[in-house]
Each structure stands twice: as structure tokens, then as C-alpha cells.
Amino acid sequence: MMEKYITDERTGLKYELVGDYYLVVGDDEPEEDQPIGVWGQRHLRYLKEHHRVLYANLLTSGELNAYLADIDRQAEELFLRLVKQMADAEGITETLKASDQMEWVRRMNSVRSRATEIVNSDLILI
């Protein structure tokens, strides 16, 4: 017979037997308490101004916070991926940063601005 709860002495994590598997017993944040970042806040403002019915439905069903957290996570991942891809494509390197900091900042600001516009049009303002 397998024990219902075990503790990993090396990491200090507690596990609970669920079916045939041990799953981590944690202090996971409830979905309604997930932090919402800048992308989620932008989308919330957009929903309030342009999609009031969807906003009201998400709010009354209790799914608004989880929805915004998901949008925020997706937008942040897309933004970081776009910035990296654009910087690589345009040859913006650490060598440039070391040799001409102002040029590196100018070019990175341009890349970040374009990536922000793409994320806004693809995920935030839909």
C-alpha cells in the first residue's frame, strides 16, 4: 500500500497520492488572485471601453481574472519572442552594445516599439 502523503527530504516538497501518481501539494494561488501584468491591464481597459458585454459576462462568471492572466502570459511570451527574433534579424548584439551603447539603445527601442504594436494588434486590441 502506498502512503497518501510523502515529503521529499532533499527539496522539502510535499506530495499527495492521486490515483497512481504523486502530485505536489502546494500553496498554489487561486485563479482569482493571479497577478495581472501590463498586457492584461491594457486588455481589461479595452474590454471595458469596447466590449462591455464580454467584460460583464467574464466578470459575473468569475472568469475575468483567469482570462486576463492568460492574455497577459500569452502577450508577454509573444513580446519577448518577437524582440529576440527582430534583434537577431537586425544584428543587434552584445558586441554592438559594448562598442556603441547609444546606437544599441536606439535600435532596441525601435525593436521593442514594433513588437509592442504587433502584440497590441494581435492579442490586446481584438
Image (spheres, rainbow, N blue to C red):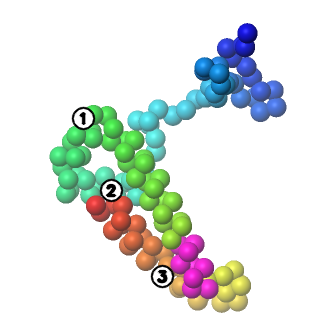
Q: Which residue is mark 2?
A: 43
Question: Furthest residue to the front?
Answer: 20
The answer to whether mark 3 and mark 2 are in CB contact below 8 A is no
Q: Please indicate, yes or no, whether residue 8 appears anywhere in the rendered image.
A: yes
Residue at 67% of width from left, 14% of height from top?
A: 4
- Left or right: where does residue 27 sit relative to residue 119? right
The residue positioned 27% from the left and 41% from the top of the image is 58
Does 87 appear in magenta?
A: yes
Residue 89: image location, x then y, percent: 57, 82
- Secondary element under disc 2, as helix, strand or loop, is helix
Q: Nearer the viewer, residue 89 or 66?
A: 89
Return the residue nearer the eye: 74 or 35: 74
Where does the image place residue 46, in percent across and percent down from the top left? 26, 58
* Residue 105 is at least partly visible in this image: no
Which residue is the extreme one toward the right?
10
Question: Where is mark 1, residue-wise?
Answer: 60
Which comes before the other along the chain, label 3 or label 1?
Answer: 1
Residue reaching furthest to the top: 1
Report helix, strand or loop for mark 3: helix
Of the two numbered discs 3 and 2 on the same chain, state the one appearing first in sequence: 2
Q: Which corner quadrant holds the N terminus?
A: top right
Callout 3 crowding tier (Cα within 10 Å): few <14, some 14–19, many ≥20: some
Name the residue carrying label 3: 110
Amino acid type shown at disc 3: Ser
Return the x and y of residue 49 as percentages of the image width and height: 20, 56
Which residue occupies 43% across, 54% down? Answer: 72
Marks 2 and 1, how far apart at CA: 17 Å
Residue 56 location, quadrant: top left
- In the displayed structure, 54 sits above or below 15; it is below
Q: What's the magenta region?
A: 83-91
Q: What residue type is disc 2 on?
A: His
